[in-house]
Amino acid sequence: MTILIDQPELVGEEEKKVLVEENGLVLDGGFLAPETNSFGQTFRAYDAESQRQAGVENFYRINHISQTYDFVQRMREDYGKLDKVEMSIWDCCELLNDVVDESDPDLDEPQIEHLLQTAEAIRKDYPNEDWLHLTGLIHDLGKVLLHPSFGELRQWAVVGDTYPLGCAFDESIVHHKYFKENPDYHNPAYNTKYGVYSEGCGLNNVLMSWGHDDYMYLVAKENGTTLPSASLFIIRYHSFYSLHKSGSYKHLMNEEDAENLKWLQIFNKYDLYSKSKVRIDVEKVKPYYLALIEKYFPAKLRW
Ligand SMILES: O[C@H]1[C@H](O)[C@@H](O)[C@H](O)[C@@H](O)[C@H]1O
Ligand SMILES: [Fe+2]
Ligand SMILES: [Fe+2]
């Protein structure tokens, strides 16, 4: 059951309401989602005419044709070695200064802005969950795969929504039609509801399309982060919109996934709706995040 609690703070005309579950989990920290993005469109309107539409659709065409079960296995094996670079979390944030994501209809700012906008929006509504602030800061760091020192992967292998391989592609996935040209689409071992999986097998056993989510999850875990399991879950599945937004693929989840999904759904609002042209003063907030990084990560990580 969820309870509505009035917040004394007034936001414009509206009074802030906070949704709290019986177990104390704050489902809605009072975040008021804007109706339109900085291009005047609703968020994630993949078919609406806009200056980014054609580029984004072309991105998904290539992504859907190229992500296969075999490809993901090879990438996980190669990048799982973490033998590319040694650097700190903050160094990586700075590398993302130059990265713009071609899959995103709502944002054309450098990625470091998005990281700080997400983290700061969470911090405002959930001041005591410092692990969630840091999760906001690092959730997209895997986009560093686009950087020359990481083999300069193409955008289709790094960004965009993610989905399972090894079972049928669900209709709720953005621009689903392009999967018809993916070899796995025609492979009977991979194109049924369960494919190579079984009921409740747990997402940990599911091979997701390769990109910044799974890579950053591997980096955080293998470098021994002390962040809680909900944080690792958020990092790993934040682009899995067909699950956390559309509710598809729930038959593959286990109980732990179901618990963690609640946090992911909270996180998603901040990840999506904090995207704006309002810049954060990096130097001002840097000391706070450096302290958090020190609390949850070693000084240097293997990437
Ligand atoms: O275009 C966006 C972007 O690449 C995000 O980082 C990712 O998490 C989203 O799922 C995707 O739709
Ligand atoms: Fe992301
Ligand atoms: Fe993000």
Image (cartoon, rainbow, N blue to C red):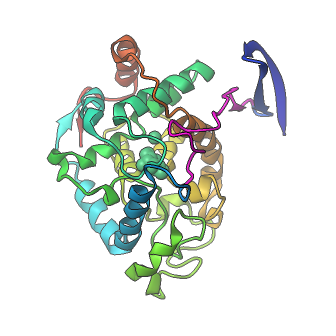
Report how many numbered discs are placed on residues in the image.
0
* Quadrant housing the N terminus: top right
Q: Is residue 112 magenta?
A: no
The quarter of the image holding the C terminus is: top left
Front-most of residues 127 and 58: 58
Q: Nearer the viewer, residue 231 or 157?
A: 157
**Measured from the top left, where is residue 187 in percent x and y?**
44, 86
Q: Is residue 47 above or below residue 104?
A: below
How would you classify the magenta stretch by its main secondary structure? Answer: loop
Q: Is residue 227 visible?
A: yes
> Is 121 situated left or right of 180 in this image?
right
Q: Quadrant of residue 251?
A: bottom right
Location of residue 74 in the rendering, given as x and y in whole percent from the top left corner: 27, 67
33 magenta-colored = yes
In the image, is residue 17 above or below residue 147?
above
Q: Residue at x 62, y 22 (%)?
A: 125
Residue 299 placement (x, y as % from top left)? 26, 26
Question: x, y (%) of residue 126?
Answer: 61, 23
Which contiguous range is marked in magenta? 24-45
Q: Is residue 232 left or right of residue 302?
A: right
In this view, 5 is above or below 165 = above
Residue 236 seen anywhere in this rendered image of the structure: no
- Of residue 110 and residue 195, the one placed in the foreground of this image is 110
Residue at point 38%, 73% (across, down)? 65
Give the camera-side residue of 163 and 78: 163
Residue at figure coordinates x 37%, y 43% from the top left: 221
Task: Report the side of 240 relative to 114 (left or right).
Answer: right
